[in-house]
Amino acid sequence: MRIPFARTSAETTLFLQFARCPCGNGDFPGHGLPWSAAVLAVGEQNTLRYDWDCPGCGRYREYSFRTPGVPEPFPRAGEIFRWGDGVTPSQLLDPGQWMVVADRYADRDGARAAAAVDEVLLFVRKRMLGRWAVPRTAFRTADGWRRYRRDPREFTRDRLLIARDGYRDATVKG
């Protein structure tokens, strides 16, 4: 199995939030568990492995990610927040999951919500009849499909741009 590419540590954290243990526990190192509860190993070709025992059921959990060769820079004042690199679609989260992230941040952090919609826009492709939208094949998780089925029209380019700009406007006014 190919190890997925994690563009930033923020994206890795979001992925781990979605990857709940089958027992339902969502704690992971750095989020509900101390970092000392995990073995973080850096391997060949910039791979990073997180492993720990679930505090809910004791099940062994392990996730490995490929990471950029150069660490992500800290955002400078005035820069637009980004979850990823702004160029390549996520290999960790699908477009529906990114919309769940936008929903989660909508009321409290418009910049992060807008950045999540920017991530969805990276999946947009030209479809039949010249329409631009996220293809159904981009949705690969139960969370993503659930969000897509709520309103598939939200995944057209025009609707995504309106949503993103609305979050950005709310941030400026807020």
Image: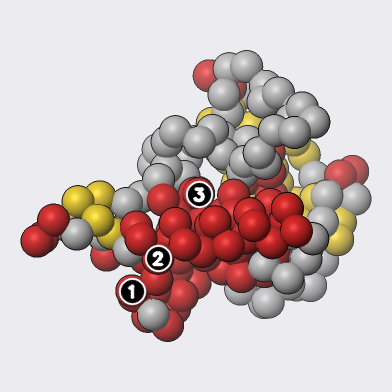
Contact between labelled residues 1 and 2, with CB atoms less than 8 Å apart:
yes
The numbered disc on residue 159 is 2
The quadrant of the image that shows the N terminus is top left
Q: Residue at x 67, y 67 (%)?
A: 106
- Above or below residue 170? Residue 125 is above
Q: Is residue 58 left or right of residue 94?
A: right
Q: Position of residue 164 (x, y in %)?
A: 53, 57
Mark nearest the camera among 2 and 3 is 2
Nearer-the-camera pick, 42 or 173: 173
The quadrant in which residue 47 appears is top right
Position above or below: 74 against 107: above
- Asked if residue 36 shows in the view, the reply is yes
Secondary structure, mark 1, is helix
Report x, y in % for residue 113: 63, 58
Q: Quadrant of the C terminus?
A: bottom right
Closest to the observer: 117 or 26?
Answer: 117
Q: Which badge, 2 or 3, is on the more N-terminal residue? A: 3
Residue at (50% x, 36% y) in the render: 86
Q: Is residue 139 left or right of residue 103?
A: left
Separation of residues labelled 2 and 1 (CA atoms): 7 Å
SS at mark 2 in the image: helix
Near mark 3 (Cα within 10 A), the count class, few <14, some 14-19 or many ≥20, is: many
Q: Which residue in the rendered view is the most extreme toward the left? A: 129
| Residue at 47%, 62% in the rendered image | 162
Q: Earlier in the sequence, mark 2 or mark 1?
A: 1
What is the spatial separation of the Cα atoms under label 2 and label 3, in whole angstroms?
Answer: 12 Å
Residue projecting furthest to the front:
173
Residue matched to label 1: 153
Label 3, on which residue?
A: 118
Q: CA distance from mark 3 to mark 1?
A: 16 Å
Could you tell me the amino acid type at mark 3?
Asp
